Image (tube, grey):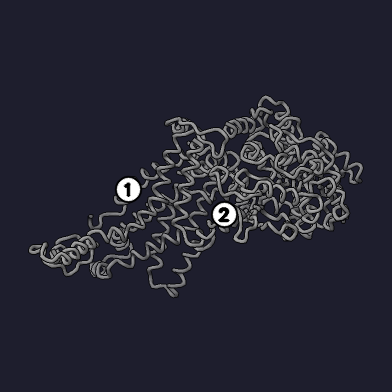
Amino acid sequence: MTSDTTRIASGRGLEPRPPVRDLPPTTGDDGGDPSRSWRYRLSRLDVKFSPYLFIAPFFLIFALAGLFPLLYTAYTSLYEWTLGANDDAEFIGLGNYVELFSDAQFWNALLNTFSIFLLSTVPQVIVAVLLAALLNTALRGRVAWRMGVLLPYVASLVALAIIFSNLFGEQYGLINTLLQAIGVDPVQWQADRFSSHVAIATMVNWRWTGYNALIVLAAMQAIPREVHEAALVDGAGVMRRFFSITLPMLRPTIIFVVVTSTIGGLQIFTEPKLFDPNSGGGGGSDGQYQTVVLYMYQQGFLNQDVGYGSAIAWVLFLIIIVIAGINFLITRRIAGTGEAK
Amino acid sequence: MRHRSSRWVKVLACTAALAATAATTAACGSSDDSGKTADGKIELTLATFNEFGYEDLISEYEAAHSDVKIVHRKTGKSDAHHQNLYTKLAAGSGLSDVEAVEEGHLSKVLARSGQFNDLKEIGPSGLDTNRWVKWKVDSATDKNGHLIGYGTDIGPLAMCYRKDLLEAANLPTDPAAVKDMFSSWDKYFAAGERFTTAGTGKAWFDSGAQIFNAMVNQEEQGYYDKDDKLVVTSNPVIKEDWNQVTSAISKGLSAKLPFGQPEWTTGAKNSAFATKTCPSWMLGVITESAGPENKGKWEVIDAFPEGGGNWGGSFLTVPKQSKHPKEAAELAAWLTAPEQQVKAFSTAGTFPSQVEALSSPELQAMTNEYFNGVKAGELFAKQAQAFDKAQYKGPASGQLQDEVFANALQAVEQGKSSDEGWTQAVENAEKVAK
């Protein structure tokens, strides 16, 4: 029972295993010495249950701070429930969900979310990979460059949003002033739906591209030099090596980046919230850039319709799971034919 | 259900407290449970936001009441303060003994008036509510006649205008003529048309919502009737005001700058608009935003279309959660007495809502350099008494004003037609008020 070598040799790598003690052989005199047997049993229990005990705090806190709110939100979504109202909440079953699916404002918010998500995630991941490839070359002052791309991520999101709101101001914003200087009509960054999405996506991309680039860069550096050298010997050019070696071997990382971007992108809240001049949850004068989370916030916390807000939260949760799953499959396919598994 | 939900929240809060550090445990010690400190003093908590100017007053009160210790919880932003208020009202615990409430949130708080003490009942017996201007008391009185808040400060409305821009557009600038121009909304909009057709390239007001809100708040009946039924479509004056404002927008009177945004500040600096609805605190905002280069160009005058109005100001309430409601009410009553509010005015510039304080020499003597040395204290004291009715506000009045109608008017300014904007406003109003 103490020899693990065979397992390691045959298995898929080192699995986390409990510490192994010098235990008496399992066969033989258990009943001989009562104290020894007691200690033996304790040891066994130790080996068996300690690992669970060590990881328990995470799961306890997760159950408290993650799972409970999740389930409680599901419970809340079945009620017509106004926060702090004088009258009691009323059980309406799936009523909130039925209402949600015929709610034009929800579909509008969903469409906005996807539009902003596509405008941010797609360019973001592509630019991040290219940026990582550049950072991976023999640059002068490499560390400074690598630190540099992370700077937008370090800056306060609120400060960024204020600066970008100023840049994208309709009447006095820097971008419109520049556009007018070269004779282009000013863009209605707030009023026009698509323009507002571009403005918000720019904010997101500014912040996250560098961060993702560094993650991809880390993965790039883990690619064994020998593979590249072998390809070089075989006469493969820079592009060929990038598409046939680098990209396929980055696949797990790119999947990670895409999935986290999906989760973040579909939950986008702060940027549109701070982009809104009326600072409520409306997302523009007519919901031009109201996202699903913004709509949830408006319903749950501004209108204090907690039940409806919870229903929105759950639908969004399911949508994110589905989209993240689809993205996972697509990325696996796109990111080429690297070693399977 | 409400009871069950609040119990759940408590369970959650307790578990969270258990998981938290020793600091939390210390804070959950004896003082919170009995509301008393270790040395047997009554501990009163007072929650305010921004600047109420109460710091010195609190020490003064503690010196006079040796058995009371006051803990002052200050929140920087009004939004965060009120969000906390609503959440803890729903949770059923955690509120301070005295909670400040801003005027814009009053309708929401009045809709939950059952969770606040009636200050007429628990407040000091000799207190005469006539010490406040009448409309201030009326606006904090719920349908059952319970007074849930003592008035602290107010924001009486006057008109600010750019003398130089009026001159440039050949509009009269002597005070009597300006007062006449600002005496009714019809005259105000007519002057605005003359101003814009003069071709200075400037707008008459900053944004439609600012004008519309002032108009609606002057009406006998606003967005709700007294049974809390939404009357946006059945109350004809709302649509009339809407038509007037949107027609003004279509004639180019609006600078299309929502108040409180960076664009507004830049607009003020660039002289984008000639007039502004001006509560007392707006003088400071204009001074900051328009900057030194526009000093002396702005004027404020003791006139407002159709009389007057109010924008801003707060109340002190005593939630039923308080363990020492009587002592809390006594503190709130003392803080909102004229003498104390005059002191608060001197430290934090909060314009007092008490009749006696309005005629105090400190207030009457206040002048404003930026606005050509105008006697601002005297002027706004006069405006505070220029109107006497407080419109009844329904549960979502604040949201209807700041989100629904402000957004719809902005949509019109961004190119929607008046009718489309109205449809949007009505749809969203019904949603918010449901």
Q: Position of residue B158 (x, y in %)?
A: 81, 44
Q: Residue at x 84, y 56 (%)?
A: B368
User: In the rendering, which numbered label is found on residue B32?
Assistant: 2
Q: Position of residue A212 (x, y in %)?
A: 41, 59
x 19%, y 63%: residue: A38
Residue A76, horizontal then vertical, whole percent: 45, 38
| Separation of residues labelled 2 and 1 (CA atoms) | 56 Å
Q: Residue furthest top?
A: B234
Q: Residue furthest bottom?
A: A140
Mark 2, Cα crowd under 10 Å, few <14 / some 14-19 / many 20+, is some
At label 1, counting other C-alpha atoms closer than 10 Å, the crowd grade (few under 14, some 14-19, many 20 or more) is few
Front-most of residues B29 and B349: B29
- Image quarter hosting the C terminus of chain B: top right
- Judged left or right of residue A71, residue B175 is right
**Looking at the rendered structure, which numbered label has been put on residue A330?**
1
Tag shown at residue B25: none
Q: Amino acid at mark 2?
A: Asp
Examine the rendered structure and indicate whether residue B339 appears above or below residue B394.
Answer: below
Chain to which mark 2 belongs: B
Q: Nearer the viewer, residue B104 or A297?
A: B104
**Residue B415 visible:** no
Number of numbered discs visible in the structure rendering: 2
Q: Find residue B73 and report its image quarter.
A: bottom right
Q: Is mark 2 in CB contact (under 8 Å) with mark 1?
A: no
Secondary element at image label 2 = helix
Amino acid identity at mark 1: Ile
Mark 1: secondary structure: helix
Kindly identify which chain the residue marked by label 1 belongs to: A
**Which quadrant of the view contains residue A134?**
bottom left
Residue B128 visible from this viewpoint: yes
Discs 2, 1: same chain: no
Residue A323 x/y as whole percent? 37, 44
